[in-house]
DNA sequence: TTTGCCCTCCCCAAATCTGGCGAGGTGGCG
DNA sequence: CGCCACCTCGCCAGATTTGGGGAGGGCAAA
């Protein structure tokens, strides 16, 4: 088992493109003898990207219906840190239950474990294993393989980040201390006038910071700048 | 080895307070026979929190000089995803080298591995192992224990998040689909007019959504609302 | 069925933000 | 020593956002 994990990680480490990630998900699925393995990810540009073993039909359906916006797995994982068993999620709404039923029809599986992964600059990814089986069988699988899955998920994300950045680069522009302070106060809901008082400078000076931050962040307006600063982990509210 | 890891994880899982985390770092250090293990973390309120085996002198010094703002380990890890060996970081600046020399004097160690961990709402933590040894010895240690350290780091963070939230609470108010869409477009930098076009509604209607979202989120203005929606993981830019 | 939330639309005046102009002092790095 | 980035301040005019009104139809849960 452990050797297999090693082999997979090595394969992943040598992955050259998304196709290789795809192959990796298939190997994993076969290795664990479960229904699906999926890794997908939303980058800072809002582009979706994924590799996995779901049927094309389901992927198309998912995109068509814009399920990303209501999928309880996504919504739940966005708020959590630990790997989460699908059973623990909030399926109380009618829409959620309908979605789940449909997913099962498309062969996704009635059991699942999703691991949220967060990278720098607000990057968020999800690594999911799913299967068709009873609660007992699934618990056994999860207990046995959770750790390995976490490591694998990490390897996937490492690779995805490499692909995105094309090596490294992505020098997220550093904001100066005052610029960060300005962004922080704005993110806390202060008006420019209030923030200026808080920082003990004139409102005009504050404006200079905000504009500097806007330019550095390539933001279109103040709200955008604050959103980017937050997303990139430059400030925390 | 593996059993020891299990035991440690179990101990962590039952940790009741920060003191237990402290104990865990000491056990880990003794187990791996290295100089230090440190877990520290900046929460959303900007409060720093830590458990580790560094000497109190060094911690005091670090806080006093506000090294957090220039520590290359912190700055480097904020931009990365993978565990990072201190050797890979940017020590080119004069201040950085001086800092490193001082750290060694305080017994921190000349070798280190730091694992960045990110949680929901921009939470960021660092798990670090350090020692005094040559490059070869350190590589061997890292190769052998990286995976375990990653899992342990994860356990630490899981616990830290539990402590912060005091169980769960924080029932983040659900926004309606249109409200979420409105927040998302604003977070992407669109003006209200643009977002209204994008959503194919009048600008006035859009305003109603924004105000509704503001009220639900307890936000003082639009920027604040977007910041909160982002922080709470309700939307992704 | 009634209540409540969601979606849609409209007006107006005040407050706020944006963009562009210019100016001076500090401190680090090569 | 010069360059560059940072921090600080002022004025003005136009564009945008905000806050507070009101109003109707739809859908779903209680």
Image: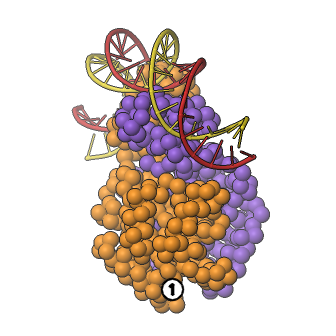
Chain colours: A orange, B purple, C yellow, D red
Query: Where in the figure is residue A166, as x and y percent of width and height?
Result: 29, 63
**Residue at numbered disc 1:** A32
Where is A142 relative to D30, above or below? below
**What's the residue at 68%, 63% (across, down)?**
B159
Q: Dot 1: what SS?
A: helix
Query: Where in the figure is residue B174, as x and y percent of width and height?
Result: 61, 46
**What's the residue at 37%, 71% (across, down)?**
A56
Q: Which one is in front, C11 or A158?
A: C11
**What's the residue at 62%, 86% (across, down)?**
B1
Where is B232 relative to B189, above or below? below
Mark 1: give few (<14), some (14-19) or many (20+) Cα within 10 Å: some
Residue A118 in sight in this render: yes
In the picture provided, is A191 more to the left or to the right than B43?
A: left
Q: Which one is in front, B6 or A33?
A: A33
Task: Tell me the chain of label 1.
Answer: A
Q: Which one is in front, A42 or B89?
A: A42
């Amino acid at each position: 088992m452990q050797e297999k994990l090693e082999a997979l990680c090595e394969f992943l480490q040598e992955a050259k493109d998304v196709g290789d990630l795809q192959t990796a998900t298939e190997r994993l699925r076969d290795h664990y003898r479960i229904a699906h393995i999926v890794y997908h990810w939303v980058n800072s540009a809002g582009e979706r990207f994924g590799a996995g073993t779901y049927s094309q039909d389901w992927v198309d359906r998912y995109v068509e219906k814009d399920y990303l916006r209501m999928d309880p797995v996504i919504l739940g994982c966005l708020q959590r840190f630990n790997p989460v068993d699908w059973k623990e999620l909030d399926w109380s709404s009618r829409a959620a239950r309908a979605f789940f039923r449909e997913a099962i029809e498309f062969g996704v599986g009635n059991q699942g474990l999703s691991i949220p992964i967060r990278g720098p600059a607000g990057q968020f990814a999800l690594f999911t294993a799913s299967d068709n089986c009873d609660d007992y069988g699934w618990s056994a699988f999860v207990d046995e393989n959770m750790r390995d899955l976490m490591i694998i998920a990490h390897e996937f994300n490492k690779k995805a980040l490499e692909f995105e950045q094309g090596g490294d680069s992505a020098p997220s522009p550093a904001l100066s201390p005052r610029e960060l302070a300005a962004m922080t106060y704005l993110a806390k809901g202060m008006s420019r006038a209030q923030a200026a008082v808080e920082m003990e400078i004139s409102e005009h000076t504050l404006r200079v910071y905000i504009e500097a931050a806007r330019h550095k962040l390539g933001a279109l307006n103040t709200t955008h700048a604050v959103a980017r600063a937050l997303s990139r982990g430059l400030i925390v509210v």
